[in-house]
Amino acid sequence: MSRVVVGMSGGVDSSVAAWLLKRQGHDVIGVTMQIWQDEDACFIEENGGCCGLSAVEDARRVAAALDIPYYVMNFKEEFKKQVIDYFTEEYLNGRTPNPCIACNRYVKWEALLNRSLSIGADYIATGHYARIERLENGRYALRKAAVPVKDQTYALYNLTQEQLSRTLMPDGAYSKEQIRQFAADLGLKVADKPDSQDICFVPDGDYASFIEETTGREIHEGNFVTPEGKILGRHKGIIHYTVGQRKGLGLALGYPAFVLEIRPKTNEVVIGTYEESLTRTLKADRLNFMSVPDLTEPRRVFAKIRYNHKGAWCTVERTGEDEITCIFEEPIRAVTPGQAVVLYDGEYVLGGGTIR
């Protein structure tokens, strides 16, 4: 059978993924990726991610219980360049990044896959809830998890064909409850380990303080304005806000107020009504196509504009060398520059891009 390197976070999902692959007869090697050093500031991302000392110890114990080799690999340099620098730059430019998507593509896959291949592995594997299939057209594509409530395909839309062809995701065929039961039956202590919801390098959720400390940049106050430019009050600095935000604005306008736009050049945050926060159109770039090599004509697809978005129908067409335009059938709220729009053709990921 094949040699498979499993990214082990110390959580239940990646632990059971390793066991499932060993049960299938693969030669399994467990690897924990050391990408964020500060133990106090490291909440373990459940689906196979960042690691402080507690994650390493949990993963090491699981590997011993499964009787598989186990190693820790250092990817801190790649993580800083591809995730932290990107995260801070996006916020400083008035956009709202998704660091998990960047980490998946460039660290958990590109860096781990290259290093794994260099030590003789055939595949890497993770504990994500998604499935990988080769389609009739010869392309590899992500298919939604068998139990949609845990589906994680949104955060994986920009994996390349080469990466998909070298990846296994055994957990995608099961529910979270089944995965926990497998772990309990095996006597693994991580069976009841809670999922982490936080960005691993900002566990307290204070993005603004992290950006200031990391970049050494002083973030200046500015004006809240209407779309027409009327000043409504003062804001704390653009990195404190995201398009679509309603809470924490500190404005008493007599109506529910929403962030419509962030203007870094003038240091303004544009405020409007709920109705003004709705749109039917978005544009995206930094494209990655998955189930198809390209878009050659307009196509009706199901789209998600953030991880927890239930999704909406739209017509998508290519409108530039690195641009697609989506026109939605019903108005949608909080189309946020920097976030991903992911397009689905049935259960399969067609592709996606970064919202402008």
Image (spheres, rainbow, N blue to C red):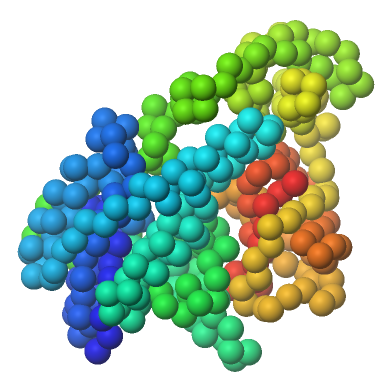
Within the image, what quadrant is residue 275 found in?
A: top right
Q: Residue at the location (39% across, 69% down)?
A: 113
For this rendering, which residue is in front, 215 or 246? 215
Judge whether residue 330 can be spotted in this image.
no
Q: Is residue 341 above or below residue 122?
A: above
Where is residue 197 shown, x and y percent of the image?
40, 41
The x and y percentages for residue 248 are 59, 18
Asked whether, in this view, residue 188 is left or right of residue 305, the answer is left
Q: Position of residue 107 (x, y in %)?
A: 43, 57
In the image, 218 versus 191, the foreground residue is 218
| Residue 279 visible, this orientation | yes
Relative height, residue 46 to residue 24 (above, below): above
Image quadrant where one finds the N terminus: bottom left
Q: What residue do we see at 19% from left, 50% from top?
A: 56
Quick check: 298 left or right of 179? right
Indicate whether 195 appears above or below 111. Answer: above
Q: Quadrant of residue 67?
A: bottom left
Q: Residue 123 location in percent, x, y?
A: 35, 77
Q: Residue drawn at (33%, 63%), measured in percent from left and top?
A: 127
Q: Quadrant of residue 289?
A: bottom right
Question: What residue appears at the point 28 percent right and 79 percent down from the top-left corner?
Answer: 120
* Left or right, 266 with reference to 179: right
**In the displayed structure image, the side of residue 352 where residue 175 appears, left or right:** left
In the rendered image, the residue lying farthest to the right is 228
